[in-house]
Image (tube, rainbow, N blue to C red):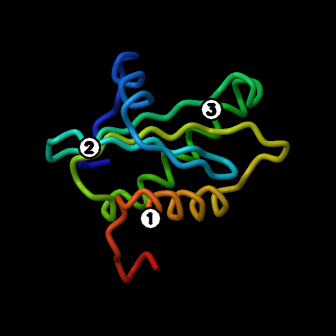
Amino acid sequence: MDKTVPLKKNYEFISLYKKGRFFVGKYIVLYVKRNNTKTNRLGITVYKKVGKAVKRNRMKRLIKECYRHYEESVKNGCDLVFVARNSEIMPGYAEIEREMKFLLKKMDVFMQDKKND
């Protein structure tokens, strides 16, 4: 992830939850807020209700890999937080990727690119 730095501090997440916009999908929720810089900041959270540590870590890895795939198509200057939702089935890479693209387009942070459409 070349132009993305991680969100680490709790107050950064809380600020984004309170002041950012969000949209809910079937497997993930996306929170977005402009940060007035040239870099994007990414945070990934998974509720404890999602499952045991193995399942939560797998969800984080899937979300991170899907974001890495779309990183070049995301507009600069955004704080993004992906929150994994509890679902009965464990989604695969394709479902997460499809939903992430939908959410990024819905929140208007996805630049149209012919190779990703």
Where is residue 67 shown, x and y percent of the image?
45, 52
30 or 58: which is nearer to us?
Answer: 30
**Of the image marks 2 and 3, the number of the one nearer the N terminus:** 2
Q: What residue would you read off at disc 3?
A: 57
What residue is rendered at 42% in x and 27% in y? 18
Task: Tell me the SS state at disc 2.
Answer: strand
Q: What residue would you read off at disc 2?
A: 34
Q: Quadrant of residue 43?
A: top left
Where is residue 91 shown, x and y percent of the image?
73, 52
Q: Do the CB atoms of the residues marked 2 and 3 lie less than 8 Å apart?
A: no
Is 84 placed above or below 89 here? above
- The mark tally for this picture is 3
Where is residue 97 shown, x and y percent of the image?
57, 60
Under mark 2, the amino acid is: Arg
Q: Do the CB atoms of the residues marked 1 and 2 lie less than 8 Å apart?
A: no
Residue 34 in the figure: left or right of residue 117: left
Under mark 3, the amino acid is: Asn
**Of the image marks 1 and 2, the number of the one nearer the N terminus:** 2
Is 11 placed above or below 104 here? above
- Within 10 Å of the Cα at label 2, are there few (<14), some (14-19), or many (20+) other Cα atoms? some
Q: Quadrant of residue 45?
A: top right
Q: CA distance from mark 2 to mark 3?
A: 27 Å
- Within 10 Å of the Cα at label 1, are there few (<14), some (14-19), or many (20+) other Cα atoms? some
Q: Nearer the viewer, mark 2 or mark 3?
A: 2
Under mark 1, the amino acid is: Lys
Is 70 placed above or below 43 here? below
Task: Tell me the SS state at disc 3.
Answer: helix
Q: What residue would you read off at disc 1?
A: 105
Is 14 placed above or below 61 here? above
What residue is rendered at 37% in x and 61% in y? 108
Residue 68 in the figure: left or right of residue 100: left
Q: Nearer the viewer, mark 3 or mark 1?
A: 1
